[in-house]
Image (cartoon, grey):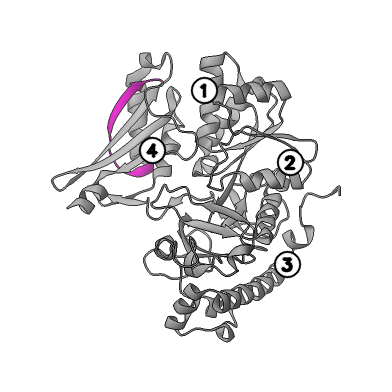
Amino acid sequence: MIRQTAYWNPLLETLPPEKLRRLQLYKFQRIFTWAYEHSRFHRKLYAKAGIAPGDIRSFEDIRRVPKVEKSMMRDIQRKDPFPYGDALCVPLEEVSVFRQTSGTTGQPVYQPDTWQDWEWWAECWSYILWAQGYRSKDRVFIPFGYNVFVAFWAGHYAAEKIGCEVVPGGVLDTQARILKIQELQATAMMATPTYVLGMAETARKKMGIDPSELTIGRITCAGEPGASIPATKKRMEEAWGAKVYDHAGATEIGAWSYECIEQSGGLHVNEACFLVEIEDMETGEIIEEPGRRGKMIITALDRYAQPCVRFDAKDVIEWAADPCPCGRTFRLIRGGVVGRSDDITKVKGVLLAPAAIEEVVRGIAGLGDEYEVIIDRLGDLDRIKLKVELTSGAEKRIKEIEANLKDQLRLKTNLSYRLEFYDFGRLPRYEVKAQRFKDLRKKTSSES
């Protein structure tokens, strides 16, 4: 089927807001009832809170439903039925797809999906790719080491679903991937921001290839906030001569938001498939108005094997004030996901978001893409060390760069740093999710 439209699902993506809200309430009632009736974990949780399916009649009632956190899912897995435990809502023989979280925040959580759930995953990703201009004429290269975590698996299936030709680059190393892009004249690819920049660096430094002269025209990013951070997006777009688009998703949740070709400074929430609430991190109040940051509480409205009902994702977001000029009625979150509530930490009495440091480092000419932040404590005093790399020839301007870096860090984060400069290539490189932010105070506290 050839779609002559800017929208993957024109009916749902342009549904009037009041009808969209009615649809969300209906779908929430349905998934809540399903979880209550089929999951021992959810039924016990809801019974303890004194809430049952007949009690959900409004959005105010939804706010009474207990939240679920990742730690709770870790506690129940590996119980009967092994390895998923009490949250499984279908017979084990109906599970057709296994994935697990990447484990960057602790013990991985296992995620079972039925074939229907997996089709839903691909449908959610189809919204994303279509909104970002992918079409059947595209040859999409996926430089992803296919593994047990979901990453770009669903993006692969969605690209096929909308008619693209897909080239999987799983077992190839970085140089081989670049050569395959060059050989096949791929027009698009998907990767983490870290790896997009790392591929460009490898092409230039090790292969003498200018990535901007390759045929990649669009890049979809995931796994890190980088593609919604202006300085990082700019570096990727300049390196590849391509448009870079962001999307946000998670193994336990699904692919819930996306940037469209308008690039209006935010991500659309796929409100036909997800209910997103923003909760004040101190009071627990649900935030409806734009401009106030809070943590995301999310429900996947159509996923049944292991339901995601009012999941505390800990992603920090805020509603945008204005609708996107693309015409979608799905609301926008301004600036995308700006970080995680468990990453935003208080240093010297000031709240620090790692994304603010990334914006500063990648906005200064002469600094490489990689950096590392280490927070520790000497006595009662918090200290922050920032390690950065100098690009070739930048050592001649180190005093100018250092002064600019100090000023911008103070302006954007209201904190001072101990700076360490390294030759280009000295700091660690990552292929999937980078781990550049290390708070050693937490480690010390847990050991004491």
Residue sitting farthest toward the left: 379
The magenta-colored residue range is: 412-424
Q: Is residue 292 left or right of residue 381?
A: right
Magenta stretch encompasses residue 418: yes
Inter-mark Cα distance, 2 to 1:
25 Å
**Contact flag, marks 2 and 1 (Cβ < 8 Å):** no
The kind of residue tagged 1 is: Glu
Q: Is residue 261 left or right of residue 6?
A: left
Residue 319: numbered disc: none
SS for callout 3: loop
- Going from N to C along the chain, the mark reached first, 2 or 3, is 3
Q: Residues within 10 Å of mark 3 (few under 14, many from 20)?
A: few
Instruction: Using the rendered image of the protein, determine whether residue 262 is visible from the camera's viewpoint.
Output: no
Residue 134: numbered disc: 2
- Going from N to C along the chain, the mark reached first, 3 or 1, is 3
Q: Residue at x 78, y 49 (%)?
A: 6
Please give the residue where the numbered disc 3 appears in the rendered image.
Answer: 16
Which dot, 3 or 1, sits closer to the camera?
A: 1
Magenta stretch encompasses residue 407: no
The kind of residue tagged 3 is: Pro
The kind of residue tagged 4 is: Arg
Q: Position of residue 314 (x, y in %)?
A: 44, 58
Q: Residue at x 52, y 33 (%)?
A: 195
> In the rendered image, which quarter is residue 184 located in?
top right
Residue 436: numbered disc: 4
Q: Residues within 10 Å of mark 1 (few under 14, many from 20)?
A: many
Tell me if residue 179 comes above or below residue 26 in the rendering.
above
Inter-mark Cα distance, 4 to 1:
18 Å
Q: Residues within 10 Å of mark 2 (few under 14, many from 20)?
A: many
